[in-house]
Amino acid sequence: MKFALNITDWQARAPGLSDKAQWQAWAQCPGAIDPSLPQAKPSALPMMTARRLSSGSRLAVECGISLMRQHDIDAVVFTSRHGELERNFRILQALATGQDLSPTDFAMSVHNAAVGNLTIALKQPVVSSSLSAGLDTFQQGLCEVLCFLHAGYQRVLMVDFDGNLPDFYHPGLHPDMPTWAYAVALVFEAGVNLRCESVAAPFAGEPALSQSMQFLQHYLRRDSTFTIAGERLQWRWSRA
């Protein structure tokens, strides 16, 4: 598979990282992200909405609102490997212990809860999609972005995110898998500045950063070529 895209703007959130200067510094001297550092307080997200959202969705909607206020966005793609796992775990706990289910947890437990809250907060009925594809969630999300662009949409916002993974699941996870909340938001247009080609490759193991954060790291460093590993493919990127 081969495709090309242009990026016109971006935002990201992770523990201890929020503004672009911090991300630029991290990309030049990448190190392990400290999950004990605080997340930046939302500035664009309405307080009542922020209280309703899970950790990852809060970051995703915050980034989404900020970028949609700056750009004329025609379509939105939200991607998340684990979705609303925090809420679903609380629901399972309540069922297992015979407690009443939280109406908020029940209503907000679906995979497209985050992107739905984005359009509600902005009062914009923009076309949207939400998907998950395991380790390759970010790269498969780009395929969805391409579909929108080929369908005639001019500017597509994509937000890749995950929330804090509950401690209950940690013993079953690969030790390198990130378990902290983050969001990477990118505004795409049709173009040829960034090119990608996929090639078959064996699974190289769980990375210490999500595909989207690996991509952002290389993009901010302006690397001329780089590779993002997936489960069955390598995604080889280059700058025009």
Image (tube, rainbow, N blue to C red):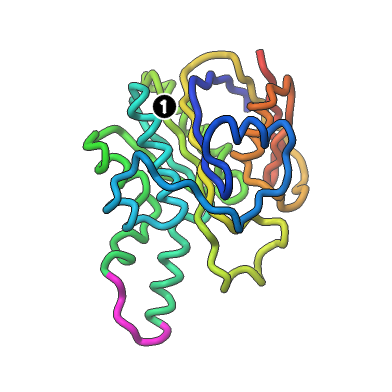
Is residue 101 shown in magenta? yes
Q: Quadrant of residue 95?
A: bottom left
- Horizontally, residue 66 falls left or right of residue 10, namely left
In the foreground, 122 or 240? 122
Name which residue lies at 73% across and 44% down.
31
Please tell me which residue is depicted at 72% across the width and 23% down the height of the picture: 223
Look at the numbered disc 1 and give the secondary structure of its residue: strand
Residue at left offset 62%, top offset 49%:
135
- The residue under label 1 is which amino acid type? Val
Q: Nearer the viewer, residue 234 or 226?
A: 226
Which residue bears the numbered disc 1? 156
Span highlighted in magenta in the image: 96-102
- Looking at the rendering, which quadrant does residue 44 occupy? top left
Instruction: Check residue 118 for magenta coloring.
Output: no
**In which quadrant will I find the C terminus?**
top right
Q: Give x and y (percent) for residue 169.
A: 59, 70
